[in-house]
């Protein structure tokens, strides 16, 4: 599966537009992370546990988007975007979305 943020894939031609695809996940904080985050807010610096949690959430959302594209028979996703929003004060949603397409290498 080719996944790009651009509108096209250099060296490939689009044979079919399979449609909109998306994947999402909602991640919540936990008490242990919140205590450490509170301490980091006092002294400053990166909150590594939250960084790791959000990286995992992004990968999960992208994986679900990829599965959605595969269900539609696509072999690539173009114009991919990632967004984050707060669901509650203790949870955030990550959504990955794009356009599923079927592509093949261009013939010279």
Image: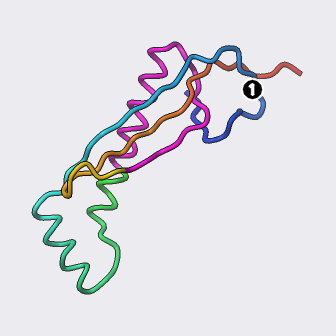
Q: Dot 1 surroundings within 10 Å: few (below 14), some, or many (20 or more)?
A: few
Q: Does 87 appear above or below 24?
A: below
Residue extending farthest left: 31
Measured as percent of width and height from the top left, residue 41 is found at 25, 79
Of residues 20 and 55, the one nearer the viewer is 20
Vertical placement of residue 99 versus 58, above or below: above
Q: Position of residue 11 (x, y in %)?
A: 78, 30
The reply, left or right, for residue 4 in relation to residue 95 is right
Q: Quadrant of residue 25?
A: top left
Q: Which residue is mark 1?
A: 12
Residue at 61% x, 21% y is 101
Asked whether, in this view, residue 78 is left or right of residue 49, the answer is right
Q: Quadrant of residue 45?
A: bottom left
- Picture quarter with the C terminus: top right
Name the side, left or right, on which 104 lies relative to 83: right
Residue occupying the far right of the picture: 108
Q: Which residues are magenta?
A: 56-84
- The residue located at (30%, 67%) in the rendering is 48
Residue 107 is left or right of residue 31, and the answer is right
């Amino acid at each position: 599966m080719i996944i790009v943020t651009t509108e096209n894939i250099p060296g490939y031609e689009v044979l079919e537009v399979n449609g909109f695809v998306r994947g999402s996940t909602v991640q919540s904080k936990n008490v242990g992370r919140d205590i450490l985050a509170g301490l980091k807010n006092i002294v400053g610096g990166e909150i590594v546990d939250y960084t790791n949690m959000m990286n995992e959430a992004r990968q999960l959302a992208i994986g679900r988007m990829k599965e959605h594209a595969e269900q539609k028979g696509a072999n690539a996703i173009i114009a991919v975007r990632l967004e984050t929003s707060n669901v509650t004060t203790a949870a955030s949603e990550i959504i990955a979305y794009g356009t599923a397409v079927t592509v093949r290498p261009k013939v010279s």
